[in-house]
């Protein structure tokens, strides 16, 4: 039983902090507390990101329509998310630092594919998904220089802002939010992580 607890604890703590907490019973080590808090918050953000765009995906599926969703906005958003996860992955950052982006990328790619599909172009949906997997391979497979990934990552805040403004203009022109979900209209999670 002790081995199981240690194995689980070492996902959140390093060996020194495990010893401080469970061997020496020193619960007031500030550095260990900060590290534990940081990892727990990172994992909580990842858990929350697993479902953040699901309401919009369900709304698109239920209505069989991507009406009101700006493809340009979705593509700009997926570029920003991809830059973040690619740079973080290549730099070797822990999954807790960028894992939420990976779930957001999958959900955003699904939204883009559904918009293409219900927009009357199943071929575009398939090509988009294959192309996106190819882009991920190029960015995360060691084919892209680190300085390029860094530059992409550095531009994330303005890119996300532009993407949101494109969607806002689309909403204004349509005088409707169409198939946008209220939960995803105000997704500032990407901006706060950067």
Image: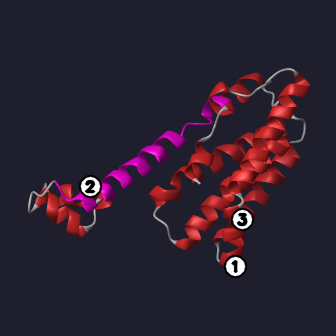
For disc 1, the marked residue is: 145
Residue placed at 24% from the left, 58% from the top?
Answer: 30
Dividing the picture into quadrants, the one containing residue 169 is top right
Magenta stretch, residue numbers: 28-57
- Do labels 1 and 3 touch, CB within 8 Å? no
Which numbered tag is attached to residue 33?
Answer: 2
Q: Is residue 159 above or below residue 167?
A: below
Residue 64 falls in which quadrant of the image?
A: top right
123 over 134 or under it: above or below: above
Q: Disc 2 to disc 1, how far (Cα)?
A: 36 Å
In primary-sequence order, the first of circles 2 and 1 is 2
Q: Which mark identifies residue 152?
A: 3
Quick one: label 2 or label 3, which is nearer the N terminus? Answer: 2
Give the quadrant of the C terminus: bottom right
Residue 127 image point, x, y percent: 83, 54
- Tell me what residue is drawn at x 9 percent, y 62 percent: 23
Q: Residues within 10 Å of mark 1 (few under 14, many from 20)?
A: few
Task: Say which label, 1 or 3, has the lower sequence index.
Answer: 1
| Front label number (1 vs 3) | 3
> Residue 58, labelled with which disc?
none
Q: Is residue 101 visible?
A: yes
Q: Quadrant of residue 156?
A: bottom right
Q: Secondary structure at mark 2?
A: helix
Residue beneath the point at 79% across and 59% down = 131
Indicate left or right for 123 with 96 as reference.
Answer: right
Cα separation, mark 1 vs mark 3, equals 11 Å
């Amino acid at each position: 039983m002790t081995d199981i607890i240690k194995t689980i604890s070492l996902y959140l703590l390093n060996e020194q902090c495990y010893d401080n907490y469970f061997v020496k019973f020193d619960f007031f080590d500030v550095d260990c507390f900060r590290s534990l808090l940081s990892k727990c918050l990172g994992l909580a953000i990842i858990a929350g990101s697993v479902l953040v765009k699901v309401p919009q995906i369900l709304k698109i599926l239920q209505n069989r329509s991507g009406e009101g969703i700006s493809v340009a906005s979705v593509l700009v958003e997926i570029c920003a998310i991809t830059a973040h996860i690619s740079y973080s992955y290549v730099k070797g950052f822990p999954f807790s630092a960028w894992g939420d982006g990976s779930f957001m990328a999958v959900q955003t790619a699904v939204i883009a594919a559904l918009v293409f599909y219900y927009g009357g172009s199943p071929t575009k949906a398939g090509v988009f998904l294959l192309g996106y997997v190819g882009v991920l391979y190029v960015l995360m497979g060691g084919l892209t220089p680190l300085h390029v990934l860094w530059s992409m990552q550095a531009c994330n805040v303005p890119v996300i802002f532009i993407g949101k403004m494109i969607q806002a203009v689309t909403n204004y022109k349509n005088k409707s939010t169409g198939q946008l979900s209220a939960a995803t209209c105000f997704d500032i999670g990407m901006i706060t992580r950067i």
